[in-house]
Amino acid sequence: MSPFDSIGCGEAGTEPGAETGTGTGAASCSACAVRSLALCAVLDAVDIKRLGEIAQSDRYEAGQTIFSEGDPADALFNVVAGAVKLYKLLPDGRRQIIGFLASGDFLGLALAETYAFTAETLTGSTLCRFPRRRLEALLHDVPRLQHQLFVVTATELAAAQDQMLLLGRKTAREKICSFLLALSHRAVQRGHKANPVFLPMSRADIADYLGLTTETVSRTVTQLKTTGVISLQEGNRILIADLDELCDLAEGT
Amino acid sequence: MSPFDSIGCGEAGTEPGAETGTGTGAASCSACAVRSLALCAVLDAVDIKRLGEIAQSDRYEAGQTIFSEGDPADALFNVVAGAVKLYKLLPDGRRQIIGFLASGDFLGLALAETYAFTAETLTGSTLCRFPRRRLEALLHDVPRLQHQLFVVTATELAAAQDQMLLLGRKTAREKICSFLLALSHRAVQRGHKANPVFLPMSRADIADYLGLTTETVSRTVTQLKTTGVISLQEGNRILIADLDELCDLAEGT
DNA sequence: CGATCCGTTGAGGTGCGTCAACGGGAGTGG
DNA sequence: CCACTCCCGTTGACGCACCTCAACGGATCG
């Protein structure tokens, strides 16, 4: 079995030359702002150079589709700057957001020949694009990279399992509280402050992530604000006023 | 970074000698019944032998706990025979089943030092047990095994994302129909017949897997039976009478 | 300054949960 | 062999958490 089977791509067609992004340019991975966060953190100078040769940096506007569910999975991406949402749709338009991504996050992993979800920017974003075939070749040569990809995937799997518990068994209030805590936790992981949590996504996006409606999200947030657990700030920020209480509310204690 | 970091295990204590299973014995992987299904399918004769040296086959009764959420993640397992459920609990006892496993399935993957969920047998089962440290050493030596583990993990991630869509956005009827279709699909993958689908789990387990209650599961199944889409058979089997209709109902068409 | 989008709030409806009862099968013990 | 218990699945009655539908205000934009 070749490493090509690892992230899909049964057939190897020509590389698409045209880009979907509004801006395009060769990437200099060595100087990358998110190098320490991303998959590439495990690479040494030589391999970083090889990565730079296959990577391409693209600029996307807010609300732009990076790829759609069912598209041929030709490339993988790293978020350099901005924010991205991933979602799946039902035939009648119901939507489930399966993840929000920020700087350093990886996306586009597909074992099949097509993407299993749609990726769309929340804000203006810069993404690093790796043609799949070339990245797979690099993976084959660099075990550490292969291993890091495994770690990232396993981490996402664990997060997905937490989200299953949330979606299947938590109440609206518990969902909102868990969501805020998770956002705060991720902010810390990225080296930001834990407390005023920034929400780059709309109420509709939050609703589709938590299996609720926008109205329920709005009402629940209002209720948390009224009871003094949180308070709303300028620029889509939420201040966690009572962390202990928020933690309790997140698990129904 | 050592491969030891890959599937967790910061500290390497002594191997626990005692087994939790009711029966115990050295494994002969070469003659393993599920070898073609399992992770081990990619190994050659030499590596299979090495695997056999670290593997141990254990017998479990129905309803026995293999490991619990929070336990030190000392080992990984392969289901040789039987069926297993994986679940997470909230403090007040609400439960979310995150997966059902059958012969050939792999379990126990943990990036942290402890398991993130509980594993419990549904029926009497035989499991192959791999001490984590030893398996990690083998992974380090055998890239194909490492790669196969990645493939398995990525496949599970995709399934988890499908389940998020189900839990967050589907109605009770859609959930039940999707569940039956998924069971049928998996049966085919394992070389069994697609149609009379065998359900080794209780209504309560199905409910906790789909984010419903036992009553709703029961009512919905009754309704599908009444409308002639399915029919119940001996021994926890369900016959899919109208596959097209079931597919339509699974996505709300 | 109209149009559009987003967030909020209210009023009312409903899908599913809760509570309760019942029947059948399996295990147990006399 | 029968009684007894326990567990599981089913069904009914009812309630509620959340959805649906609707209206409104503020922000952004052409």
Image (tube, coloured by chain):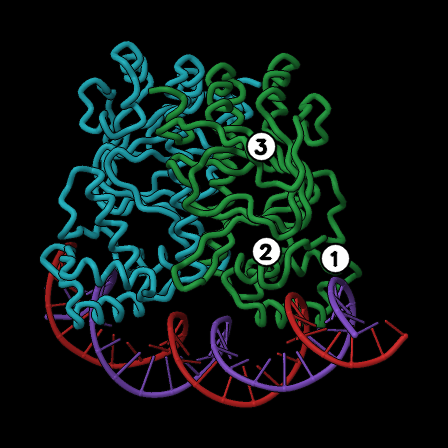
Chain colours: A cyan, B green, C purple, D red
Q: Which quarter of the image is occupied by the N terminus of chain A?
A: top right
Q: Nearer the viewer, mark 3 or mark 1?
A: 3
| Residue type indicated by callout 1 | Arg
- Which of the 4 image quarters holds residue A76? top left
Mark closest to the chain's N terminus, 3 or 1: 3
Say if A158 sits above or below A111 in the image: below
Q: Chain of mark 1?
A: B
Residue A157 appears in the picture as rendered: no
Q: Report crowding for label 1: few under 14, some 14 to 19, many 20 or more residues within 10 A (C-alpha).
A: some
Label of residue B178 in the image:
2
Marks 1/2 same chain: yes
Q: Nearer the viewer, mark 1 or mark 2?
A: 1
| Residue type indicated by callout 2 | Ser
Q: Which residue is mark 1?
A: B237
**In screen coordinates, is B131 left or right of A167?**
right
Marks 3/1 same chain: yes
Q: Label 3 near label 2: C-beta < 8 Å?
A: no
What residue lies at 60% left-to-right and 37% top-to-bottom?
B105
Q: Chain of mark 3?
A: B
In x, y percent, where is residue A69? 45, 43
Q: Which quarter of the image is occupied by the C terminus of chain A?
A: bottom left
Q: Chain of mark 2?
A: B
Q: Which residue is mark 3?
A: B129
Say if A8 sits above or below A185 in the image: above
Mark closest to the chain's N terminus, 2 or 3: 3
Quick one: A157 or A91, which is closer to the camera?
A157
